[in-house]
């Protein structure tokens, strides 16, 4: 059998994989023609090209893979014509191939509206690596950019412009709202607000009438006579199926484009199939890769003697758009008398959740998640497998009435036929059988065995839960090993390092580990040693085990320079100290910026200048702010009762006391805190790892909150505490966290994984259920007593100072490759070319 595939995109490549996997006869001959000059690459993650991935990194397989599987691949040679009568095709470069079966995987092209001026320089589409290379090369001369299209691809393109350093980015959408196919009006408003807060300029319900400028674009003119200035435009207004080859060959096509296929993916010629974005099934073009993969599997099944059919595909999707979670599943827009809808709309946090239920409230029909989509996988499985909902369906995303998050049965209670990986069509049963029958006991081995999780990656958390649950059901003891060099967990290593009195990474590796170590275990062990003994992290040979920032006690920045953040406890600073910061910044030509943690960050320092800068700051009474370490960062405060007429207590003084107690404390991840003088919460204490809010009777202590990409409110641990009791509880809380959390785990995630949640944590910290309180308080006091400023130790130690040079043989010389550019009376690092 000879099969010719026209198109070497993601779906065409997947068909090759499926045919090879199903082929039991050696006589299969595969020939592939690709219009692109390179083999198939990952277009789902195309935007990662701007994050540093190369074209080679994005390749799905190189030429050697095709050769290894005896596939004849022609790249850069599009097919010119098909002759169905003689079963032959003719290529642009003059090749002729006959076939037994022909598969069209020609994909789609960008739809470019007929706007006057579309031919101007600075106007691009966003489809291929070549497009992205042109955008990247043009971007350095651009101050403002625009995107026509507010759908998935349009917002991806907007993120690309932001990643390229373009400060002003506009998104122009013809429809009344962003992402009209995935999100309802209320959800779109929340999404738009969130994106505008990130700096995007959104124009909905806007029709572009003309692209302004001469040879180069200078702006856009809209139908309502409004206009904007822009130096660059990306058009991402949708796709059109590449059906021209089929149409010219006499195959049936749709009125609005697309090659008409049946459930076998056959066209009007039974020997010619179509798959992916060029195929029109049941009046629909599927614009995602997962249904294309399902079509490829159906065709491979048909050609290899099975009878799998394509009967449509669920278009549920979850993605992160410019850092914002967006997901929709099932029927997100269900309405009518037989539909019940539950909506959560939090305009403060910009979170929107909607679930649509059957009339009796027992079945989940679909939903939308904006700003927070952690529950997406289980909601999707609940919807697709028609699982019965709990009596109070709102607890799916609102939590139980006692404040805890509803756990439910989880992924292990899904039926065996539940599709876990939509991209590859892999079921729960396939994954579980790989664990029990094939010995796959990690996500990586599951990926290699089944290819589950190798597409968009959204199913990986569920795969991990399935592997863990299946192994537990087999009675297997699951070790949470740190890495291949240490078979113990971080918690076990913490105790063992303490018992054996190990003070260096090398001692720990010799006594407890094997091999030479890696980038996972070195910083983790170094952090444990710092948390246990409170010693200078660069001494005793521990310097090379640190993360890159810790090695130089400063944050390395884009371009190779460093930033310096002195500690400013509670955000309180004298005019004299402010003057010193200004003098130092001016002397060493540093960019200065006030941080969200009420400190001042100074950017653009050469490594050779770091000890000199620290020396001047220390002389003025400053010390390290540990912005570079997995340690306490800041304790933010409002002015409290000393100035504010609403303040109940002196929040600044208490914040300073807290920060000076826990400064330099090393932990599995960074720690942030805040103290608010009243319930108005100006210091945002409920968004911190531990936060303190004044009450009439004392202080309320909140724990395990965080901001960032997945913000989470802190939960109340104890109420109306006096100063000493509050500090005592914080001691216990922090020591419990340091001893039991996994590496690089924030307190919020630590609590989310804790059996019993906040009730258990409260029992441990407040009620001392483990009888560890006295020991933890003593250990914390020992760390407080041993504190030394790391910057000062470097300044006063000639051996340590020697580390801070760029050229060992010329310690005074600075890195000549670091370049800066002027910006608003300051400087910025020069853009990477």
Image: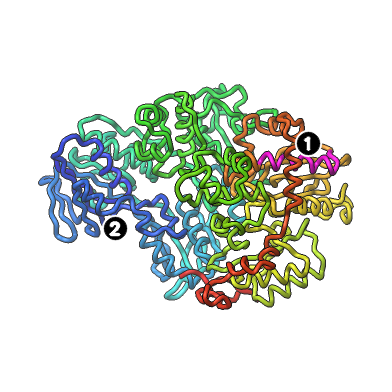
- Name which residue lies at 76% across and 72% down: 580
From which residue to which does the magenta span run?
Answer: 721-737
Mark 1, residue position: 718
Task: Check the image and report above or below for 564 versus 400.
Answer: below
Mainly helix, strand or loop, the magenta region? helix
Q: Residues within 10 Å of mark 2 (few under 14, many from 20)?
A: some
Question: Tag 1's secondary structure?
Answer: strand
Here the colouring is rainbow
Q: Nearer the viewer, mark 1 or mark 2?
A: 1
Mark 2, residue position: 38
Residue 243 on image: x %, y %: 28, 50
Q: Nearer the viewer, residue 786 or 594?
A: 786
Examine the rendering and report whether any part of residue 69 can be seen: yes
Q: Nearer the viewer, residue 786 or 500?
A: 500
Query: Cβ–Cβ below 8 Å for labels 1 and 2?
Result: no
> In the rendered view, does 3 fall on the left or right side of 135?
left
Question: Tag 2's secondary structure?
Answer: loop
Q: CA distance from mark 1 to mark 2?
A: 61 Å
């Amino acid at each position: 059998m000879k099969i010719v595939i026209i198109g070497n995109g993601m779906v065409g490549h997947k068909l090759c994989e499926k045919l090879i996997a199903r082929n039991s006869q050696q006589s299969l001959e595969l020939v592939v023609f690709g219009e692109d000059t390179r083999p198939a690459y990952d277009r789902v993650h195309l935007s990662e090209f701007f994050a540093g991935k190369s074209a080679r990194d994005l390749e799905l397989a190189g030429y050697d893979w095709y050769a290894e599987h005896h596939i004849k691949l022609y790249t850069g040679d599009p097919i010119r014509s098909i002759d169905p009568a003689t079963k032959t095709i003719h290529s642009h470069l003059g090749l002729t191939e006959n076939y037994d079966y022909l598969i069209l995987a020609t994909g789609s092209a960008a739809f470019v509206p007929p706007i006057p001026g579309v031919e101007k320089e600075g106007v691009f589409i966003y489809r291929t690596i070549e497009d992205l290379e042109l955008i990247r090369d043009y971007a350095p001369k651009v101050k403002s950019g625009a995107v026509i299209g507010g759908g998935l691809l349009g917002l991806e393109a907007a993120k690309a412009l932001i990643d390229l350093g373009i400060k002003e980015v506009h998104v122009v959408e013809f429809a009344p709202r962003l992402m009209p196919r995935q999100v309802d009006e209320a959800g779109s408003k929340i999404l738009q607000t969130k994106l505008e807060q990130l700096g995007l300029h959104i124009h909905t319900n806007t029709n572009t009438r003309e692209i302004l400028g001469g040879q180069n674009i200078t702006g856009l003119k809209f139908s309502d006579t409004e206009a904007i200035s822009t130096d660059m435009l990306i058009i991402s207004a949708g796709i059109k199926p590449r059906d021209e080859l089929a149409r010219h060959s006499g195959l049936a096509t749709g009125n609005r484009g697309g090659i008409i296929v049946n459930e076998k993916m056959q066209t009007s010629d039974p020997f010619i199939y179509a798959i992916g974005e060029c195929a029109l099934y049941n009046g629909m073009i599927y614009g995602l890769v997962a249904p294309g993969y399902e079509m490829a599997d159906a065709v491979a099944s048909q050609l290899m003697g099975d009878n799998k059919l394509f009967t449509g595909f669920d278009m549920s999707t979850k993605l992160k758009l410019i850092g914002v979670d967006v997901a929709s599943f099932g029927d997100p827009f269900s309405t009518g008398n037989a539909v019940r809808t539950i909506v959560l709309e939090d305009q403060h946090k910009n979170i929107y959740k909607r679930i649509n239920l059957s009339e009796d409230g027992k079945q989940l029909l679909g939903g939308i998640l904006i700003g927070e989509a952690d529950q997406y996988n289980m909601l999707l499985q609940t919807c697709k497998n028609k699982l019965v909902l709990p009596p109070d369906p709102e607890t799916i995303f609102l939590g139980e009435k006692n404040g805890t998050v509803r756990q439910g049965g989880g992924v292990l209670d899904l039926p065996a036929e539940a599709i876990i990986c939509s991209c590859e069509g892999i079921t729960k049963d396939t994954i579980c059988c790989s664990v029990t029958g094939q010995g796959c006991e990690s996500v990586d081995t599951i990926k290699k065995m089944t290819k589950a999780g190798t597409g968009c990656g959204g199913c990986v958390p569920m795969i991990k839960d399935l592997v863990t649950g299946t192994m537990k059901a087999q009675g297997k003891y699951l070790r949470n090993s740190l890495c291949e060099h240490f078979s113990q967990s971080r918690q076990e290593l913490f105790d063992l390092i303490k018992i054996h009195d190990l003070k260096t990474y090398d001692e720990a590796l010799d006594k407890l580990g094997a091999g030479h170590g890696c980038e996972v275990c070195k910083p983790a062990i170094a952090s444990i040693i710092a948390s246990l003994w409170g010693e200078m992290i660069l001494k005793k040979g521990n310097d090379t085990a640190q993360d890159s920032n810790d090695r130089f006690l400063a944050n390395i920045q884009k371009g190779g320079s460093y930033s310096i953040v002195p500690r400013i406890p509670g955000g309180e600073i004298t005019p004299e100290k402010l003057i010193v910061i200004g003098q130092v910044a001016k002397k060493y030509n540093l960019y200065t910026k006030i941080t969200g943690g009420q400190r001042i960050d100074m950017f653009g320092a050469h490594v050779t200048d770091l000890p000199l800068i620290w020396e001047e700051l220390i002389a003025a009474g400053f010390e390290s702010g540990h912005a570079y370490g997995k340690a306490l960062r800041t304790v933010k405060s409002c002015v409290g009762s000393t100035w504010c007429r609403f303040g109940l207590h002196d929040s600044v003084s208490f914040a300073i006391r807290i920060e000076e107690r826990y400064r330099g404390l090393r932990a599995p991840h960074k720690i942030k805190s805040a103290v608010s003088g009243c319930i108005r919460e100006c210091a945002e204490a409920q968004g911190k790892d531990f936060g303190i809010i004044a009450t009439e009777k004392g202080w309320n202590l909140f724990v395990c909150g965080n901001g960032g990409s997945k913000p989470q409110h802190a939960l109340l641990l104890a109420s109306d505490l006096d100063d000493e009791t509050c500090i005592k509880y914080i001691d216990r809380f922090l020591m419990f966290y340091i001893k039991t959390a996994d590496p690089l785990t924030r307190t919020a995630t630590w609590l989310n994984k804790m059996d019993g949640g906040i009730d258990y944590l409260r029992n441990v910290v407040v009620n001392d259920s483990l009888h560890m309180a006295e020991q933890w308080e003593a250990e914390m006091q020992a760390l407080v007593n041993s504190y030394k400023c790391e910057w000062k130790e470097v300044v006063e130690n000639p051996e340590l100072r020697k580390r801070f040079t760029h050229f060992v043989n010329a310690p005074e010389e600075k890195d000549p490759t670091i370049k800066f550019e002027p910006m608003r009376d300051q400087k910025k690092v020069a853009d990477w070319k």
